[in-house]
Amino acid sequence: MHLSALLDFDVLPLDTDDAVSVLIDVTAPEREEDTRRPPATLQVVLDRSGSMGRGRLDGAVRALLSLVDRLAPTDNFGLVSFNGEARVEVPCGPLTDRAEVRRRIAALRASGGTDLSSGLLRGVQEARRASTGRGATLLLVSDGHANQGVTEHAPLARVARDAYAHGVTTTTLGYGLGYDEELLGALADGGAGSALFAEDPDTAGGLIAQEAEYLLAKTVQAASLRVPVGPHLRAVGVVGEMPSHRLADGSVVVELGDFHSGERRRLLLRLEVPGMSALGVTTVTTLETTYVDPETLTTYTATLPVTVNVVPGDEASGRVPRPEVRTEEALQRAQTAKREASEALRRGDRNAAAEGLERARRGLLDLPAPGAPGAPGAGSRSAAPPARPSPDVAAQVTELDRMARMARRDDAARASKTLYASQSGYSRKSGRQRGPGASPGGDQGARRVTGDAGRGGGPGHGADGTGERDAAAEGGQQGSGGRQRGGRRVRRIRGEQTDGGRPTPDQGPTPPRRES
């Protein structure tokens, strides 16, 4: 697993409270073609209430039949359906009798109310029983609001969080325009999965197939990032919509969930740093990422120190933020704008929804484009054709413009659900993959902390070509993968920063605007 961290500022002024943003790239290892895929466990929880008639249940049935045909006999598959009560249609286990499983799926009929809680609880039980600690994916498909059993969002989200703590990732698929996107989104957040939206059977079938492909290509499961606080870090904030929680010691944990082969994700942290009275390089915190290799069930831990250079105030006065970090900050805040717009539409406030999206769009348009005059590496500041924005920025600008028009004129339920699914998809299963030879997050000229951990990984190498692995045995048997401690294999990553935190005056004359 490849990790890198890039700060907007390398230097902090002496004896001054400050804040820095750190952009973190996480890229999963790619599965080699000749590598045997470990058995996967997929538990489907399907709404069969009366509202799933009119072709919706039929569309889901077709998608599940196709899905079963793609799984291997050694994969575990289970199906729980629910209306006013839960029913185990296919006990979760190996697909040894595919024809019988297909027959049971095809026999489903829609009727009754919607006791989502019973379906969720029974599905979690089946997934945990069949996976025997290897991890599982639970896909919950529903077109309505929970109207029987437990209907409050918070208790159901806790069920998903507890399931995730026991290795079960929960992804939800909202079907049609009548479902409760806030509830299904809370389940997906709690279960570290995706919140998907399909208005019609064909879209639903495509999304179910996509989730199956992600499951079969999974190379990382149950990944999390812990950010410890300490004497040089007062508080941590997560910019954007990644689910996170705070531990009793003040540390923040971001739940990253599962990754498919080669998948890359970004997240942005805001670090509140107290004034430091000693000059020189100081470690603010040490990031710790933990995940499980689904093939070997080995737990890996990668650590990455984040350091700054404390300098006299006059030396820090010329600092400017790295554009790559500021760009990701604007992209992450755009995802928050989508969520807030979705909430505004549910309140019936179309203007607030559209205006928030338009502000986020303008914020992206105001970013300096790569290669623009005054941007890093742009060279001469003489007149030149305007540079195009990065593909990520251009895509989000187009999407925000379309969604702002949807918020003003389209069906409010459709717009709200589209927005919620869009912000969820940006952070999870986004498919942003590293191209051949590319540095994750990649300005080669920027100082970056980087490292690798995981199956077959070599020493971490950053843009500066540095990095080292500490694989010394420590109280236990050392295996080929690093440290062994109580059956848990650990890899420790150290990164270096080569520019010493010096300001880079060619990054533009405008100092950053401090945030409260």
Image (cartoon, rainbow, N blue to C red):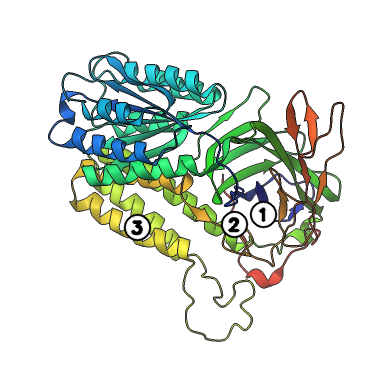
- Mark 3 Cα-neighbour bin, 10 Å: few <14, some 14–19, many ≥20: some
Residue found 59% across the figure and 72% down from its top: 375
Residue found 37% across the figure and 47% down from its top: 422
Of badges 2 and 3, the one in the foreground is: 3
Q: Is residue 72 above or below residue 337?
A: above
The amino acid beneath tag 3 is Glu
Q: What's the CA distance linking mark 2 and mark 3?
A: 21 Å
Q: What's the CA distance linking mark 1 and mark 2?
A: 7 Å
Q: Position of residue 348 (x, y in %)?
A: 22, 39
Q: Position of residue 59 (x, y in %)?
A: 22, 39
The amino acid beneath tag 1 is Leu
Tell me whether circle 1 and circle 2 mark residues in contact (CB < 8 Å): yes
Residue found 49% across the figure and 50% down from its top: 332
234 and 131: which one is in front?
131
* First reached walking from the N terminus: tag 1 or tag 2: 1
Q: Position of residue 366 (x, y in %)?
A: 46, 65
- Mark 1 Cα-neighbour bin, 10 Å: few <14, some 14–19, many ≥20: many
Residue position for label 2: 325
Q: How many marks?
A: 3
Say whether residue 420 is visible: no
* Label of residue 6 in the image: 1
Direction from residue 413 to residue 247 in the image, left or right:
right
* First reached walking from the N terminus: tag 3 or tag 1: 1
Residue position for label 3: 399
